[in-house]
Amino acid sequence: MADRRILPMNNGQVHIAPRTHTLTGVQVLGSGSYVPDNVVSNLDLQDSLGFDPEWIVNRTGIHERRFALPHQATSDLCTQAAIRCLNTADCDPADVDLLVLATFTPDMAFPSTANLVQDRLKLNCPAFDIQAACAGFVFALVVGSQFVATGNSQRALIIGGDCNSRVINPADEKSYPLFGDGAGAVLLGPGSVEQGLIAYQLGSDGSGGDLLSRPAGGSRIPPTAETVDQGLHYLTMDGRAIFKWAVRILADSTLAVLNHAGCKVRDVRWFI
C-alpha cells in the first residue's frame, strides 16, 4: 500500500502525503535537448551583481547557465529539442499523435506554446500546455504516459522548456544566478509490462504559492507601466523558505518513491 503519512504544510496545517503509483506499458523511444549558445558564467555576473563566483558554486554547484538569444523564445528552444528527439527516435512527425508541453514561461498567454511548436513541426495531433513550474516536465511525462498506457496514443511527444532569463530580475543576486534557459523532449510509445514508470509521485501545496511567484501579468494584476516600474513582472522568490520546504518535502517524496520501487538510496546512481 502507498505511503500516506501526514505532513505539515506551509500554513501550519497538515495534509496527507500524495499516493505513489506505478505505470507500465510505456517506453521512451527517443530523447533530445537544446540549450542556447549564449553562455553566462559566474564570472560574467560578478561585476553586475557583486558576489564571489565561488559563493554560488559552493552553495548550488552552478558554474554557468545558458540564456536565450534576443530573437529566441520558449517555443524556439522546445522546437529544437523536439526535432532532435524525433531524429533520435527515427520518427516521422506525421506519426506523432499527442503533444504535451510543460512550461511556465510561454511565448504568450495564448495560443499555447504547444500549439506554436505543433505548427513548426507540422504535427496533426492534440497539443496542450501544462503549467506546473519546476515540476512541469514530470507532470507532462505522467500525463503522456497515461495516454500511451491506456492505448489512446502510440507516439506521444513530451517537451519541457523555459526561458527563465525573460522573467528573472537581473539586479536580484539571490535569484538571477540560479536559473537558465533550455528544453528537453522525449517520445513515448507502447512498451511491455516490465517497462514504464517504476514509481512516481505527484503532489501540490498551494499554500506556498507566495514563496515563488510572478505577481503581475495575469488577470489578478494586469500588466501596466506601473507594474513594470515596480518590477512586478519579474519572478519573486523566498529562497530560504523554499529551500527548507524542498528539503523536507522532496526528501519524503524521494524515499516514498524508492520504497514503492523496492529500491534503497544506495541503489541509485543519479539524483536529478
Image (spheres, rainbow, N blue to C red):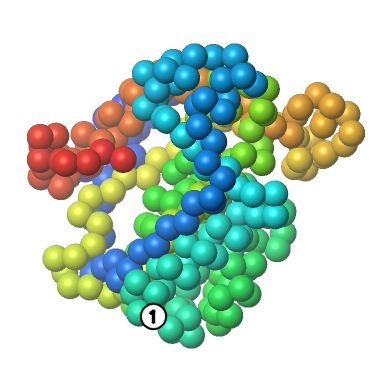
> How many numbered badges does the structure rendering display?
1
- Quarter of the picture containing the C terminus is top left
User: Mark 1 is on which residue type?
Assistant: Cys
Percent position of residue 152, x then y: 39, 77
Quadrant the N terminus occupies: top left
Dot 1: element: loop
The image quadrant that residue 218 belongs to is: top right
Residue at horizontal 82 percent and vertical 39 percent from the top: 222
Q: Is residue 166 above or below residue 245?
A: below
Figure check: 244 above or below 61:
above
Residue at the right extreme, as displayed: 225
Q: Is residue 166 above or below residue 240?
A: below
Which quadrant of the view contains residue 31? Answer: bottom left
Q: Mark 1 packing: few (<14 Cα in 10 Å), some, or many (20+)?
A: some
Residue 225 visible in the snapshot: yes
In the rendered image, which quarter is residue 230 located in?
A: top right
Residue 61: give x, y in percent of width and height: 37, 27
Q: Position of residue 127 (x, y in %)?
A: 56, 69
Front residue of 75/226: it is 75
Across and down, in percent, residue 48 comes to 65, 21
Residue closest to the eye, 170 or 246: 170
Compared to 84, does 68 lie above or below? above
Name the residue beneath numbered marker 1.
91
- On the picture, is 3 further left or further right than 227? left
Residue at 55% x, 79% y: name it.
123
User: Residue sitting at 58 percent across and 80 percent down?
Assistant: 122
For this view, does 4 lie left or right of residue 261? right
Q: Is residue 133 visible?
A: no
Q: Residue at x 47, y 41 (%)?
A: 134
